[in-house]
Image: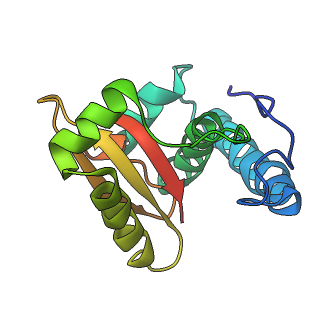
Amino acid sequence: MYSLPKLPYSYGSLEPYIDAKTMFIHYNNHFKTYLKNLNEKIVEEKIHNQPIEELIKNVPYYSEDVKNNGGGYYNHLLFWKMLKPRISNKLNVPTGLSEKIIKRDFGTFNAFKKEITEKAKKTFGSGWVWWIMLPSGKTEIVQTPNQNNPQMFYNCEILQGIDV
């Protein structure tokens, strides 16, 4: 069974980018519902205990309900960790290895942001935009519909995810 982690910041910590009400609803309604439904399906379908990452990589063996709720739960687990409150008077831009990889694969940070923004705008309905790293070390920006996760389809590491 999977559990509900505590948010690593308060609901209002991401303002003005994400308001407290949106965070509260997203965490307490959407995220908790994915968790509740996933745990119910795990019991109902007699799925053995395993790390959520393994469940996600093996979703072809499970029902659509497990795929959707497992994806919703895992995507948000990642999402909460990827977000962080802005430190005043400090630019929130990639540095170090992330900056080097972005320059290598996209040319500039602005080109990287432009590609993510364009993919997000083209996402119809519910979905996600992901920055992933393939086994070769190359990175790409990909979209997934609904609560799908790129690890359901690619052998990859997830670097960043945006809930669209």
Residue 159's spot in the image, x, y percent?
40, 37
Q: Looking at this view, is 42 or 153 the one in front?
A: 153
Residue 117's spot in the image, x, y percent?
41, 68
Q: Looking at this view, is 10 or 26 the one in front?
A: 10
Can residue 4 be spotted in the picture?
Answer: no
Q: Is residue 141 left or right of residue 125?
A: left
Number of labelled discs?
0
Q: Is residue 28 left or right of residue 14?
A: right
Please identify the quarter of the rendering in which residue 73 is found: top right
Residue 24, above or below 122: above
Tell me which residue sits at (27%, 42%) in the image. 102
Tell me which residue sits at (52%, 47%) in the image. 71
Please identify the quarter of the rendering in which residue 116 is found: bottom left
Please identify the quarter of the rendering in which residue 163 is found: bottom right
Q: Looking at this view, is 21 or 151 the one in front?
A: 21
Residue 3, above or below 124: above
Residue 131's spot in the image, x, y percent?
35, 47
- In what quadrant of the picture does the N terminus appear? top right
Can residue 113 be spotted in the picture?
Answer: yes
Tell me which residue sits at (17%, 45%) in the image. 105
Q: Is residue 33 left or right of residue 151?
A: right
Tell me which residue sits at (45%, 80%) in the image. 124
- In what quadrant of the picture does the C terminus appear? bottom right
Determine the residue located farthest toward the front in the rendered image: 89
Determine the residue located farthest toward the left in the rendered image: 136
Q: How is the image coloured?
A: rainbow
Residue 55's spot in the image, x, y percent?
46, 32
